Amino acid sequence: MSTLTIDHVSRWFGNVVAVNDVTMSIGPGVTGLLGPNGAGKSTLINMMGGFLDPSTGSVTLDGEPVWRNESVYRSIGVVPEREAMYDFLTGREFVVANAELQGLGAAEARKALATVEMEHAQDRKIATYSKGMRQRVKMASALVHEPSVLLLDEPFNGMDPRQRMQLMELLRRMGAEGRTVLFSSHILEEVEQLASHIEVIVAGRHAASGDFRRIRRLMTDRPHRYLIRSSDDRALAAALIADPSTAGIEVDVVEGGLRIQAVDFGRFTELLPQVARARGIRLLTVSPSDESLESVFSYLVAA
């Protein structure tokens, strides 16, 4: 099991600061790296993969520096976002070449191509591949030496639904095996399904870390929205609206229940059971309605 440690890392290009004093640790399992376009995700992945040196700070793998340390490359596989490839090669030739760089051969290349289900097109020129096929052959080249750390920059780009499902299942399996998998994506639904942990980068800075539901609950300065169903919705609404912890209550006439916006999260969570108990109201459903990854991400980006 391997852990990547990013310690007070910054990276600038001339006067442009791409990554600004980021500290985080990426361990075994599947981690999603989120951020708007231009937030610094690709720069951060390039530094983790040893392709770019930090301007300040350090990136280490199990205590060993990544930059200019050939030995750690045997433990890291990288799937870059950029399309640049050797189009004159076949898929098999491309993966074999990457295998040979690791001191391996054709057998390992065949296994990697099978893992990403590319055997049927392995003898075609890469120039003839679709974007999704290019993504999968890049994945095969990153997996050929069975790395303990896999870094993927927007790996789902250009894949059809079946290819996405196959790759998601592969990444889940690798995470369950104890490998360290980090992937960046702008497709929030897929991150929500796949990543057990997220790291959020906004304008080059580290904005949040952890399970997105836990991050939402820690954001006590933001209004929280709930769907509540009870044995007497109108009586409950009348009691809650009088308290300053709530900013608005709507009766949902279609689905039933109350939609409540709480501006004081701590006070509201104490108030709700007290009010229900005092008035003999049974709470049937208390469900946060803004704990999706999309909501959390929107809050963080707007912060």
Image: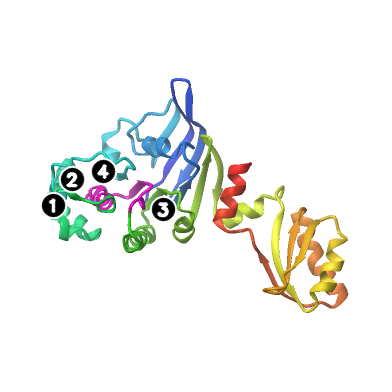
Q: Amino acid at mark 4?
A: Arg
Q: Nearer the viewer, mark 3 or mark 1?
A: 1
Q: Amino acid at mark 1?
A: Arg
Q: Alpha-carbon neighbours of circle 2 within 10 Å: few (<14), some, or many (≥20)?
A: some
Q: Nearer the viewer, mark 4 or mark 1?
A: 1
Q: Nearer the viewer, mark 2 or mark 4?
A: 2
* Residue bearing mark 1: 124
* Residue bearing mark 4: 74
Q: Nearer the viewer, residue 102 or 186?
A: 186
In the rendered image, the vertical position of residue 38 relative to residue 254, given as above or below: above
Q: Amino acid at mark 3?
A: Pro
* Residue bearing mark 3: 28
Q: Nearer the viewer, residue 292 or 143?
A: 292
Residue drawn at point x = 40 percent, y = 49 percent: 183
Segment colored magenta:
134-158
Q: Mark number for residue 174?
A: none
In the rendered image, the vertical position of residue 292 relative to residue 48, given as above or below: below
Q: Alpha-carbon neighbours of circle 3 within 10 Å: few (<14), some, or many (≥20)?
A: many
In the rendered image, the quadrant that contains the C terminus is: top right
Residue drawn at point x = 25 percent, y = 49 percent: 134
Q: Is residue 23 magenta?
A: no
